[in-house]
Amino acid sequence: MTHHTRSADAEPRSRAVPAIPDPRPADSPPDGVPLPEQALPEGAAPSPGQGLPWARVRAQGGAEDRARAVDRGQGRDQGRDQGRDQGRGQGRDQGRDQGVALEGGAEPGGGLVRFAVSSHTLRALASTEPSAEGTRLVRDVRRSKRLLLLRAVLDAAPGAEAAERWALLEEAERQDPEAVRDVLHYPATGVWAEETLRRLHAPQGPPPDLAHLGALAVAAALRAGIGFKATLRPVGGRLALPTLGLLRPDRPGPLALTERSWDSCATLPLHALPGGRTALDDLDPYRAPPAAHPAPVRPARRLTPKGHKRWDTQWSGALTLLERYDSARADEIGRLLRTVVPLGGGTRSSGATLPAAAGSVLARAQAPPALAATLVHEVQHGKLAALADVLTLHTADRTPRLWAPWRSDPRPLEGLLHGAYAHLALAGYWQRAALYGARGAWAQHARVRAQVAAVLPVLRAQPQLTVTGREFVDGMAAAERTMDELPPPGDQHATARRALERERRAWCEAHPELAAFVQV
């Protein structure tokens, strides 16, 4: 079975700019090279190492179609609540079963063309186990969604200033495509783009921050090492340059910038975590949604040098454990995680993932064993979010009615699916850690696996699952069953199941109106 969907898709850096680690491993293919399951916009013919021409990306398709494509990812839940997506999702899955693409296409003027998600790739992702094809798909989806989002922002932005900023990005891209790609696909750029597009279409709310597009362009130009002139206005005496850090001018007012500005102004560089792949972002104003949005977690304020050192120690320890116990997951984290955003004090959650900030994890400072588990857990949320952007796995609304053993509150189907997926990966990680003799790992594995095993039948029984969603859940269940090959010693698994059954009964007593949704 093949699942069809749609996709869009040097010279040395200036010595004045601090070296930015390439977030891709050395053996990963250039992003501009078409992937086996990727189709490019009609007429685009990238060569190895060369990205898509941004001007062509900007010109394709109508503004209305592009906004609709972006909203399909951003507003999926609202659409399901209104029943708009149900028939479309079911019909799309029937078409996939027959090997037919029901949307997109490569016809002239179509704007977007399709790419395929094979059943093999879907099953590989469902298992949570790292795979080359799964990682390629996730990265491709993230790039495609980001290009759609940026294109929609440009179409909706009034005036000529946005076009001028984009022209600088295009000039930088001609000199150093990788630098520009890293700036535009930086996780915080996604948060800015979604918030800006939302504000552009809500004129009664706060104005969009279109000036940040200038900061993106300047950051790209500095990294590409090209000559340029631009004038931007710092906010609060600071100018955030994504992927670089902060400029701190010595006087208020508009700031004239050139290729020498990083040397001539006081700077606060973005902190690179040990290992060279991931940055600790405590600077970018869009590293999390603006304060106006209700959120259960908030990023920490800028850390002190002591705080950075503490993170370096914990991060190094977590990577050491990941590489020792599960090197494939350590490599996957390196490929998919661009930034870690420290969580603020008072946050009870150990970690969180924001779909808008693809490639980022919010995490609390914690001991290396806990941080390693948090990274495994949160990266799965990012993988599933990318898959759900291009495949409809279910048509359920956001009504919370299902029991999730890892939470006390009822969860909607979307939340239960995400939680089960992340905990399935955790169960596998703890099993491998236990085999290496990690203290307490067998108990962790038994507890988490029992939780996943309890909810998989409930997920499988949900009538709102699409054909594709059912295949995905079946793949999760198959991965859970393979853990029988290496069971924990003694009766730890049985003990965990008995404890979980007591918790389930207590939850049903606390939520009698939802007890029927717990039974299969």
Image: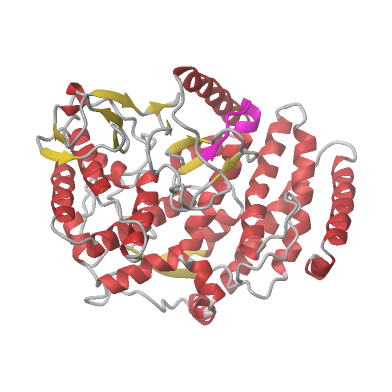
150 vs 440, left or right, is left
How many badges with numbers are in the image?
0
Query: Residue at point 70% right, 44% down?
Result: 427
Between 412 and 292, the one lying in front of the other is 292
Query: Does 412 sit left or right of 302 as displayed?
Result: right
Q: Where are the magenta residues, as a range? A: 362-371
Q: Quadrant of residue 323?
A: top right
- Where residue 435 sits, quadrant-wise, is top right
Residue 420 sits in quarter: bottom right
Q: Is residue 400 above or below residue 308?
A: below
- Quick check: can you spot residue 123? yes
Q: Quadrant of the C terminus?
A: bottom right
Q: For this rendering, which residue is in front, 324 or 346?
A: 346
Q: Is residue 471 above or below residue 164?
A: below
Visual colour scheme: secondary structure
Percent coordinates x, y for residue 411 in the rendering:
68, 60
Q: Position of residue 17 (x, y in %)?
A: 23, 26
In this view, the residue in front, 317 or 516, is 516
Residue 281 point in image, percent of width and height:
42, 34
Magenta run includes residue 147: no
Is 367 part of what is drawn in magenta? yes
Question: Is 47 situated above or below 429?
Answer: below
Task: Tell me the residue at 29%/63% (across/down).
Answer: 152
Q: Position of residue 7 (x, y in %)?
A: 35, 63
Residue 164 falls left or right of residue 1:
left
Identified at 29% across, 73% down, the residue is 64
Tell me if I can see residue 1 in this picture.
no
Q: Is residue 94 left or right of residue 61?
A: right
Which residue occupies 84% across, 59% down?
510
